[in-house]
Every structure is written in C-alpha cells, then in structure tokens.
Amino acid sequence: MSDLLTCAQALAVVQNEMQDRVSPVRVSETVPLGDSLGRVLAQPLAADRDQPPFPRSTRDGFAVRSSDAGTRTILGTIRAGKIWTGPALQQGQAIEIMTGAPLPDGADAVIMIEHVSISESTLHLDTGRTLTAGENVVPRAAEASEGDVLLTQGIRLHAAEIALAASLGYATVEVYLQPRVAILATGDELVDVSQKPATHQIRNSNTHGLATLVRAYGGIPVPFPPVADTREALETAIDQTKDADLLLLSGGVSAGKYDFVEPALLARGGRFFFTGIKMQPGKPVVFGQMPSQYVFGLPGNPISTQVTFLLLVAPLLRALGGEAYPTPHFAQATLAKPVKTKPGLTRFLPAILTPGLDKTTVTLTGWQGSGDLASNARANCYAVIPPDRESLAEGEAITVLLR
Ligand SMILES: Nc1nc2c(c(=O)[nH]1)N[C@H]1C(S)=C(S)[C@@H](COP(=O)(O)OP(=O)(O)OC[C@H]3O[C@@H](n4cnc5c(N)ncnc54)[C@H](O)[C@@H]3O)O[C@H]1N2
Ligand code: MOO
C-alpha cells in the first residue's frame, strides 16, 4: 500500500493541476439570463448606476427631519415608482412615504406608521419614541456605486447571482462553454439498462450515475457503449474519446487478470499523477493525462465510482468549466451514533445528514460495501472517517462530503 497517496496528498495533486494548468476548455457564448442557471460567468458584471439609485425608504411611514421636536404637518404622499415633485421638506413637516419610495429632499429619516398617531393632517410621534438621522433609509449607493464590479468571471450562476445580474440590467450574459466529458464503462458483465441480464450479468448503472454527476457539475456527458475487458477493445474505445475535454472510465483499475485500463491508457500516450489512494471506497482510482485531455480511471464498484467523482472529478470538471477555485463540498456535522471502522484508510461511508438550526447531525446508513447502491440512495452524504481512527464517539464533530 506504500505507493498509494493519502487522501490529502491526492486532493493536493488535483488542486495543483487546477491552479497551474487548467484553463476553461473553450471560448464563451452569450445566453439569455433566463437560461444561465448553473453556467459560469465569462465576463465581469458591473453596476450601471448607484445601488440603490436614490435614498430608499425601508418602511411604510413618514419621511421627516430627525432633528424636529414636536408635531409635524403632513404635506402629501410618496410611494414606490413615484418621485416627490413638491417643495423640499422643511422643519415641522412630514410626507407620508411607502417602502421602496425615494426619500424626498430635505428629509433624513422615516418614522414607521406603527410609531405615530395622526389627527387631521398633524403627525404625533408616540411618547418615548426617538428618531435618529438615517433611520429606516438606505442611502444612495450604500450597496454599490456605479461602475463597481459586483460579479466576477468564474462565478457559477444561481438565484442570488441571477437576481443581481437582473438588477444590473443584464438581459444576456457571457458564459463559458460546458466541458464535454466522455464516459466509458468497462466490463464483460455489463448489459444495457433496457436489456434483461442473465444471472451472471450486471446492468450498466455507472454510465447513468456518471452522466448525471457530470450534468450536476456543469459538464455535458458524452456516454460511449460499454467496452469489453480486452486491451485491444479498450485502446480502440479510448481513441474514440479524443475530442472530449475530460475522459472518465469506470472499472478495470484494480489488480485482477482482466483489469486493463492502466496499460491501455499508457499505450495510448497517457501518464499518471497517481494510481491509488488510501481511501475506501475508491482505493484503486487513477488520475492522469492523455495527449489531449485529463483522464480518471474510476473504480467499477458503483459507490466507489460516485465517491471518487465527488472528491476528485467534480472540482476538476468545475475548473474546466471556468469556475474559480473549486474544492470538494465538505461540511462539518456531529455524529448521532458511535462509529467503529478498521483504521488505515480514509473511509467515506454513506450517511444521512440532518441539518438543524442549532446542530447538524450525521448518521451512517449502514452498507454492504462499495456495490451497495440501495444504501447509497438512502444516504445524502458520506461521513469521512480519518484513517487513524478505529472508533468515534457519539457527539464527535466529523467532516462529511456532500453531494
Ligand atoms: N486483489 C484485489 N482485488 C481488488 C482490489 C485490490 O486492491 N486487490 N481492489 C478492490 C477495490 S477497492 C475495488 S473498488 C474494486 C475495483 O475494481 P475495478 O475498478 O477493477 O472494477 P471491476 O472489477 O471492473 O468491477 C468491480 C465491481 O463493480 C461492478 N461494476 C463495474 N462496472 C460497472 C458498471 N458500469 N455498472 C455497474 N456495476 C459495475 C462490477 O460488476 C464489479 O462487481 O476491486 C476490488 N478488488
Ligand atoms: O475501495 Mo473499493 O473502492 O470499495 O471496494
């Protein structure tokens, strides 16, 4: 096991590649903002005017001068979408104002409607209430000034970013093209999901799992038909994936007589950064570079395939898609029950994360090993058990890998 990297070393290898060599795979394209969910920005987005563009009332109430003492005479009403066209507010005056409306000239604060009483057109501040300058008002440009860059290149667009882009007037945005990811499952035992397998055959679930993960992390899956376990078939199939930006193989990377992935990749001009990690599931995982693309040889066991994807492939795929500084999605949680494992390997055990306001707990689903797709589907994360720990107590804080 001595030539295997630790998990931390393997993560560092992928991170180094990303920092030094990975650049977005191709040029960008312009898409309507409504079609930009999950895409990566290829241009900086700047404020076309101050935000807010005017001092904005944050409450329904009355615009006033905070320094006034005593009652105030109400001059009129101003609401969102309108501007006060009357004379500037003077001492002893108030203008009724609605949330989102521009503060009239001369006013410096807003009193909430709940804190006043009105008789005729006279406003009385409730006894004991005081008011300070700026209260219930967001000053012009408090959020951003015209020209400020508010979203930088390399950011993946979700609701928060898309809403901001809309507020800045971007009806279309320039985004990076999505990397194309070739998926090549290997194994004589594999049959298509639409076929009835014989007793000794297995449905090819990895191609479907991987294609879904590729989509989820911003790539375009390019699935190839499964390949037989021979050197010749593998080399021919590898040659057909040359146009893809990233190549993912599943199966054929362990120590068996028919595990030909590594020699076939080497024969087609590949070189390896690592060929195994002290982890389980996922120990035999291979990361390398072909003449025209990066390659991962993922272990065929379906849970090993998915864990190694989330840990290693997902960050690299996100970087190929133009995302700045991607890392695996780790979080911290408290163990709901004690855990016992064999030390020596970092374990990624299928688990259920239960987020809470005060505490987030994690419970193992229990499994029959790295082929247990049913347990994997009951889980929503993987509990990360460090390699030097044989037992962990209830209540211990641990890392989880999210998916
Ligand atoms: N003597 C040793 N044996 C094994 C070792 C080892 O170090 N020494 N490593 C074990 C580990 S850990 C894993 S993980 C597996 C990985 O094996 P391979 O990547 O070579 O995968 P296969 O042998 O081809 O398949 C393993 C398992 O997964 C099923 N499989 C494969 N492809 C698919 C697919 N596309 N869809 C669904 N299921 C698939 C396959 O039928 C096997 O059951 O090796 C251990 N052995
Ligand atoms: O470590 Mo392998 O990846 O599960 O059986």
Image (tube, rainbow, N blue to C red):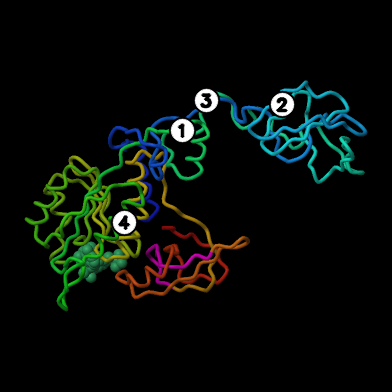
**Residue at mark 3:** 48
Q: Which residue is mark 2?
A: 84
The mark that comes first in sequence, 1 or 4, is 1
Residue for badge 4: 212
How far apart are the two marked residues, 3 and 2, measured between alpha carbons? Answer: 24 Å
Cα distance in 3D space between marks 1 and 3:
15 Å
Mark nearer the viewer, 3 or 2: 2
Are circles 1 and 3 on residues that touch, CB within 8 Å?
no
Q: Secondary structure at mark 2?
A: loop
Number of other residues with Cα within 10 Å of mark 2, as a class: few under 14, some 14 to 19, many 20 or more: some
Q: At 85% across and 42% down in the image, what residue appears?
A: 116
C-alpha gap between disc 2 and disc 1:
36 Å
| Magenta highlight on residue 34 | no
Q: How far is the residue under mark 1 from the one under mark 4?
A: 28 Å
Residue 266: in sight, yes or no? yes
Q: Which mark is residue 123?
A: none
Q: Which mark is nearer the camera, 4 or 3?
A: 3
Q: Amino acid at mark 1?
A: Thr
> Where is residue 191 shown, x and y percent of the image?
16, 67
Question: From the viewer's perspective, is residue 83 above or below residue 374?
Answer: above
Q: Quadrant of the N terminus?
A: bottom left
Please give the name of the residue rendered at 82% of the width and 34% of the height, measured from the top-left corner: 132
Badge 4 marks a residue whose secondary structure is helix
Q: What residue do we see at 88% from left, 32% from top?
A: 72
Amino acid type, callout 3:
Asp
Instruction: Out of 15 and 178, give the one closest to the viewer.
Output: 178
Part of the protein shown in magenta:
341-354
In the depicted structure, whether residue 132 falls above or below residue 370: above
